Amino acid sequence: MELFNSLFTWIMKKRIHQIELFMKYPHDVQDEWFQSLIATAEATEWGKKYDYTSILTPAEYKERVPIQDYDDIKGYVDRMIKGEQNLLWPSDVKWFAKSSGTTSDRSKFIPVSMEALEDCHYQGGKDMLSIYCHNKPETKIFTGKSVVIGGSSQINNFSPDSYYGDLSSILIRNLPFWAEFKRTPNLEVTLNPNFEEKIDQIAAITIKENVTSLAGVPTWNIVMAKRVLEITGKSNLLEVWPNLEFYGHGGVSFKPYREQFKELIPSSNMYYLENYNASEGYFGLQDQSDSDDLLLMLDYGIYYEFLPMENIHEEHPKTLGLDEVVLDKNYALIISTNAGLWRYKIGDTIKFTSLSPYRFQISGRTKHYINTFGEEVIVDNADQALQAACQATEAVIKDYTAGPVYFQQGKAGAHEWIIEFEKQPRDFTHFCEILDNKLREINSDYDAKRYKDMALRFPIVHNAEQDIFYRWMKSRGKLGGQNKVPRLSNDRTYVEALLKMMQA
């Protein structure tokens, strides 16, 4: 195993030179990918519709092809699901990633080409390990196995040759042999669609393995970890897996979960690395051990555009190229990919923290915010405020969501929060005060609306019972995989559903 570990560590480190290359020449790399994507899709139905053969520059591309959302491409996707090919992308597309549906109950099926699997998603996974091995050269990660909690995948009823499932399940089903060899448990257990049964099986199997790394969405890894401790009677994961050294996480902000993981894995040597991998593509990696910023990955077959949030509701909004972005400004991410997504608005917002190289933070969702009263509170604001409140009151948050309280009978509006604590705050009233004060400090629009309670009064905060979010997600059929608790909403749908469950 030591020889195997040394060999794989050496292989992973070799990629660092290529990463440094696109960090040094970001615009050249993006220009090359733009030209390659356009040329590759010239003969597709989409390419003919927009005459890709005559598009020579990004400016022409932006002028000719409108920004798309899922509704705009749904007709093409439906045809691809039924077996038609060469519509959005020239190679056969047989896999479709089913979205978690956090913004609506309607399922979305994102095409995943073999090029996207190999050159984007898998390259991102390999780069995550490359960066880790580079930052921690003494690693023994390859002497043991990795626990990855995937979703479930099944054959699509429309065609025997097209398949759908959570992105995680698609990736696991198509893993190269060497990656499968280093993973536990087996494929059947990992893709069990019964989440609660799967967690029991994973826990029972992996406690007998030498687990050196974890991967996946923090929410479901915590559920798994607690089950492992219940079965073993141990107080933390290092008593079960003494060689555990790495956790690659993504899907949701890690801020609300950081303290829980410190308790589950009480080691200053545990290495946490965030990745930004969505159904539509793999976009970023945390390449520095002393910073939470993500490096924008520029050579994965994706061409990027950035839409300033103040222009998002315009009929034909102007996007910016990589060479035009500025620091600390919220942009909606627009992508063109080697899976046939063209000027596609994925719904995430980012802000750049560095322009040389291009590093960023995920700031929220284009639809996951509260702006009922012009306060423009985004998920990043909420996470910062909650983190400050937790630090001040020694609390640990398990999950949360928030929505608006509308004007009524002459009363100002408010924000209503439902928070489930892993560790209760020392003083709940003080926790709420810090939450409000920190939001006012970091968001001038919120502060203006809170002035003398004219538009927004003090927030309503519910200290929720244990496991309320787990039971709510279960009632919606959204346990496991890439399903996430929606953090903020501009209406009361989620808040009302949770309050009804709490009062039952």
Image (cartoon, rainbow, N blue to C red):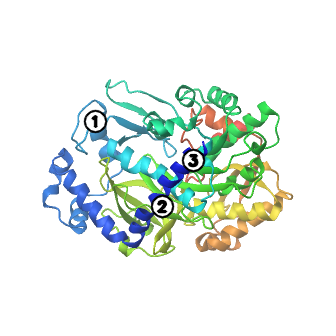
At numbered mark 2, what does the secondary structure look like: helix, strand or loop? strand
- Tell me which residue sits at (31%, 47%) in the image: 72
The foreground one among 446 and 151 is 151
Three-letter amino acid code at disc 1?
Met
Q: Which residue is mark 1?
A: 80
Measured as percent of width and height from the top left, residue 478 is found at 57, 36
Whether residue 105 is visible: no
Q: Quadrant of the N terminus?
A: top right
Above or below for 75 versus 37: above
Q: How far apart in space, not on screen, are marks 1 and 2 (Cα)? A: 28 Å
At numbered mark 3, what does the secondary structure look like: helix, strand or loop? helix
At numbered mark 1, what does the secondary structure look like: helix, strand or loop? helix
Q: Name which of mark 3 and mark 2 comes first in the sequence.
A: 3
Q: How far apart in space, not on screen, are marks 3 and 2 (Cα)? A: 38 Å
Q: Which residue is mark 2?
A: 349
Q: How far apart in space, not on screen, are marks 1 and 3 (Cα)? A: 41 Å
